[in-house]
Amino acid sequence: MNVRYDIILDYLPLFIKGTLLTLGLTVAGVALGLILGLLIGLGKMSNRLWVRLPFIWYINAFRGTPFLVQILLIHFGVVPLFMSPANPIVSAIIALALNSAAYMAEILRAGIQSIDKGQMEAARSLGMTHRQAMRLVILPQAFKRMIPPLGNEFITLLKETSLAAIIAAPELMYWGRAAQGQYIRVWEPYITVAVIYLILTLSLTYLMNFIERRMKTE
């Protein structure tokens, strides 16, 4: 098989542009998902069943359905209610954030509940409110334990951004499909895209491992 390096060179600027958007989508999805996930996780830990139920249903719905279905529903069904035409980048960020929030909620809930209850009691005995105790005592300790699963979720979300190509968001996979369609060649564009994803995921893995080691020494 003759490798056509000209395809890679022609599309290299677009691959770089797509990679930057992929990273941007990932960061936005993780940041928003973390905020929503914290609220959902705390809601699921409520003592009142009627408060817990909506959060339980939310988590089950987003964890139990394919992300491809979610992004299509959001892009073609939800976003057009607020903007026309629907912006694929906005749709991708919303879908990634909502999907990530369901997983983040479980990670955060498990991390918070792993902290001994005596920590909360000790903080309250010092005069802290429940909110202060969560913010100053519980969450900092829980965060250290949550680094590995949070890192895994970050990497998973990075790879899930590739599905945004189906709604024409110009991220990395979008340009891989464009190159394949233009040149009717499969190996060069898709192998290039795969290598870029591999570099990104390995870099994130090493970064998260470094952060985890640093947190353990503090």
Image (cartoon, helix red, strand yellow):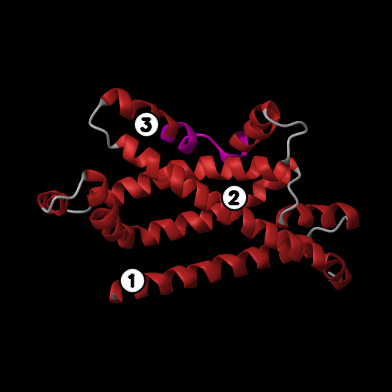
When the figure is inspected, residue 178 is found, relative to residue 207, above or below; the finding is above
**24 sits to left or right of 13:** left
State which region is magenta: 59-69
Tag nearer the camera, 3 or 2:
3
What kind of residue is marked 1? Met
Mark 1 and mark 3 lie on one chain; the one further toward the N terminus is 3
| Residue 5 image point, x, y percent | 85, 72
| Residue 90 image point, x, y percent | 67, 42
Front residue of this view, candidates 161 and 46: 46
Q: Is residue 214 visible?
A: yes
Which label belongs to residue 99? none
Taking the spot 52% from the left edge, 54% from the top edge, the residue there is: 156
Taking the spot 42% from the left edge, 44% from the top edge, the residue there is: 37
What kind of residue is marked 3? Ile
Circle 3 — which element? helix
| Residue 110 image point, x, y percent | 30, 48
**What is the spatial separation of the Cα atoms under label 2 and label 1, in whole angstroms?**
28 Å
Q: Are marks 2 and 1 in contact (CB under 8 Å)?
A: no
What kind of residue is marked 2? Glu
Which residue is labeled 2 in the image? 160
Tag nearer the camera, 1 or 3:
1
Circle 2 — which element? helix
Q: Are marks 1 and 3 in contact (CB under 8 Å)?
A: no
Mark 2 and mark 1 lie on one chain; the one further toward the N terminus is 2
**What is the spatial separation of the Cα atoms under label 1 and label 3, in whole angstroms?**
31 Å
Which residue is labeled 3 in the image? 56
Tag nearer the camera, 2 or 1:
1
Which residue is labeled 1 in the image? 215
| Residue 1 image point, x, y percent | 83, 69
Taking the spot 29% from the left edge, 75% from the top edge, the residue there is: 218
